[in-house]
Image (cartoon, rainbow, N blue to C red):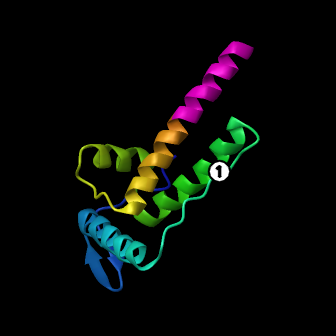
Amino acid sequence: MAVGMLHAQNVVDGLSLSPDELLQSWKSERSDSMKKRSIQKQSIQYDSPLDALVAIAKRLSRYETEAGLSSEDFFDRFSQGSWGDDTQSVEWANDYRHYLALRAELGKILDAAA
């Protein structure tokens, strides 16, 4: 599910940043933008677990692209407390948990059908 891993250096606005500096910059920008907008919870119903899995995979891909980090690596850092607990990060972690649960559910369905 990884969109891409960070290389030794990344250039942002003409500045050379280490992966840790890039991640910190991303978290800071996301936190600021989340403070500026109000958050409204939505409940979305899907016709099947597969439809839900596809929708969540698309959201995870957007998070990964923005952060330059796989959801698995993000979740490891988040779970260890070395990431933040801003709204965006909590939503990403929850989406990843939901993704794993849906994959397990679909795996059981496929195993039973085989």
- Look at the image and give the residue range highlighted in magenta: 101-114
Quarter of the figure that contains the C terminus: top right
- At x 70%, y 38%, the residue is 50
- At x 23%, y 49%, the residue is 81
Q: Is residue 68 visible?
A: no
Q: Secondary structure at mark 1?
A: helix
Q: Residue 31's spot in the image, x, y percent?
A: 35, 71
- At x 48%, y 73%, the residue is 38
Q: Quadrant of residue 17?
A: bottom left
Q: Is residue 80 magenta?
A: no
Q: Residue 5's spot in the image, x, y percent?
A: 40, 55
The answer to whether 105 is drawn above or below residue 34 in the figure is above
The answer to whether 47 is drawn above or below residue 4 in the figure is above
Mark 1 — residue? Answer: 55
Q: How many marks?
A: 1
Q: Judge from the rendering whether residue 111 lies leftward or rightward of residue 68; answer left or right.
A: right
Q: Judge from the rendering whether residue 98 lies leftward or rightward of residue 83; answer left or right.
A: right
Q: Is residue 103 magenta?
A: yes
Q: Is residue 6 visible?
A: yes
Predominant SS along the magenta part: helix
The answer to whether 45 is drawn above or below residue 25 in the figure is above
Q: Amino acid at mark 1?
A: Ala
Q: Residue 99's spot in the image, x, y percent?
A: 54, 41
